[in-house]
Image: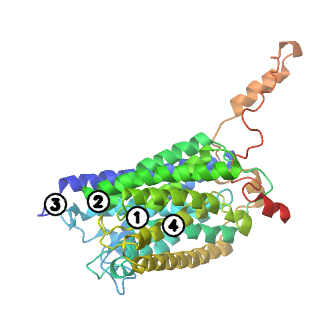
Amino acid sequence: MPEGFSAGDTAFVFISAALVMLMTPGLAFFYGGMVRVKSTLNMLAMSFISLAIVSVLWVLYGYSLAFGPDAGAGLIGNLDFLGMRGIGLNDLSGSIPVTAFAAFQLMFAVITPALISGAIADRAKFSAWALFVALWVTVVYFPVAHWVFFFDNGHGGWLGDRSGVIDFAGGTAVHINAGVAGLALCLVLGKRVGFKKDPMRPHSLPLVMLGSGLLWFGWFGFNAGSALAANGVAGMAFLNTQVATAAAMLGWLAYERIKHGAFTTLGAASGAVAGLVAITPACGSVSLLGAIAIGLIAGAVCAAAIGLKYRLGFDDSLDVVGVHAVGGIVGSLAVGLFATGHVGQTAQGLFYGGGFLQLGKQAMGVAVVGVYSFVLSWLLGKAIQRTIGFRVAEEVEVAGIDQAEHAESAYDFSAVGASLARALSAPAAERPAAKPAAKPAGNPTAKTADRTTEKPTEKTEVDAR
C-alpha cells in the first residue's frame, strides 16, 4: 500500500461499515414489531429491498454522484466513477482505501430510504415502494450526500465544505432527509383505513426492543466510524453516542410518566432511537455533558412531537416525522449551541463563546435539506401514484398487505387453529375447565402511550372535534 495507509484505520472502517449494514435489518425488526400482524412481512421487506436496490445503484452511479469530483458549485459529483471505474485498489481516501470509504458510505445510502418506509406502513404497494427507493436515492439522497459529506479543501459540497454546516454523521443528510420525505409520502398516500378509530397497536413489542437494540449497537459504527480513523475523535463520538442515547431514553420515559402515567417499553425503545438520531450530527463536536443535554432534550421533545399527527391530521404510521425529522433538527441545531471547538471541530457554539454564527449555519442546513427533500419526495410520490399507483386497494389494506403483496404471513396459526377445533369438537365433559380471568395488575386507568391507536396523546383535541 502507498505511504499514509493505515491498516488499523482500514479495519476500523470496515467493521464500522458492517455495523451500519446491521442497522437496516435492525430497523426492519423495529418497524416490523410496531405494525399489526398482517403487515409484519411487508415492513421487513421494505427495509431489505433497500439493501438490494441501493447497493446496485451505488456502484453504477451513486458513489460517483455523491463523492465524485465536484461538477460545479458544490451541488453534485461528476460521472468519473461510473461503475466504480477509475478507482484503484491502492487509491487512498485519507489513511484508508477508497474502496473502504465507498463501502462505509454505501451503508448510509442503504438505510436512509429504509427509514422513510415507517411513515407509510400498512398501505403501500411493494412494487411502487421499490421504484420510489430507486428514484429517491438518485434525485434526493445522492445530491444531498454530496452537499454534506463531500470535502475537497473548500471545493467540495456546498453545505459541509463550503458553508461550514457541521453534520458529523448524518443528521441532515440521513435523518432530516428521510423524516421530511416520510411526511411528504404520508400526505400523498393519505390516512390508513380506520386511522384514529381502530386500534393499531404494535403486534410484538419484543421485536421492537430487539430492533432498537440492534440499531443502538450498529449506531456505534454509524457515528464513531464517521471519524474514518481509529482515533480520539472516534472515541469521543462513541462515548457521546452512548450517553446521549441513554439520556434520551430517560427523557422520553419521564415525559411518558408525567403525560400518560406509565413507563412503556415502546417508549424506552423509541426514546433510545430519538437519542441516537439527535446525537448523530453532534457526536464529533460536543462534550459528554453536552451529549447528555442533547439526549434529554431530544427524548422529551420527540415524545411530545409524535402527537402532532393527531393534531394536524397526517398519518405518519410509525412516527418517522416525530423521531427522525424532529430528532435530526434538534441534534443539528444543538451543534450551534453545544459545539466546544475542542473535539473534532474548531467551530464553537453559542454556549461556548461562538455567538450565533454556527447556529445560523446549522439552521440554514436544516432548512435547505428539509425543503429540498419534501418537494422532491412529494413530486416523486405523486408521479408514482398517478402512473402505477402507490397505495394498495382498501380491501387489501383491511385484509392484510402481507398476503396480497408477498403471498406469505409472518406467523403460522394453522396448528393453533387445528388444536382449537379439536378441543371444541370434544364432548363437554372432556373439555378443560376455563380459568377465571386474572385481574389486571397496577393502575388500570394508566395510559400505555400507545401512539398508534385511536387518540392516545391528544385526547382533548380529538374529542372536541
Q: In which quarter of the image is residue 6?
A: bottom left
Q: Which of marks 1 and 3 is in front?
A: 1
Q: Of marks 2 and 4, which one's residue comes earlier in the chain?
A: 2
Residue at which label 3 appears: 5
* Image location (x, y in percent) of residue 190: 72, 67
Q: Crowdedness of circle 4 by 10 Å Cα count: few (<14), some, many (20+)?
A: many
The residue type indicated by label 1 comes to: Ala
Q: Which residue is drawn at 34% across and 67% down?
A: 340
The residue identified by callout 4 is 330
Instruction: Check disc 1 and report its element: helix, strand or loop.
Output: loop
Question: Between residues 412 and 232, which one lies in front from this camera angle?
Answer: 232
Quote the CA–CA distance across marks 1 and 3. Answer: 28 Å
Can you identify the residue that label 1 sits on? 282
Viewed as shown, does residue 173 lie left or right of 191? left
- In the rendered image, residue 363, in percent from the top left (x then y), is placed at 48, 77
| Dot 1 and dot 3 residues touching (CB under 8 Å) | no
Viewer-side residue, 459 vs 71: 459
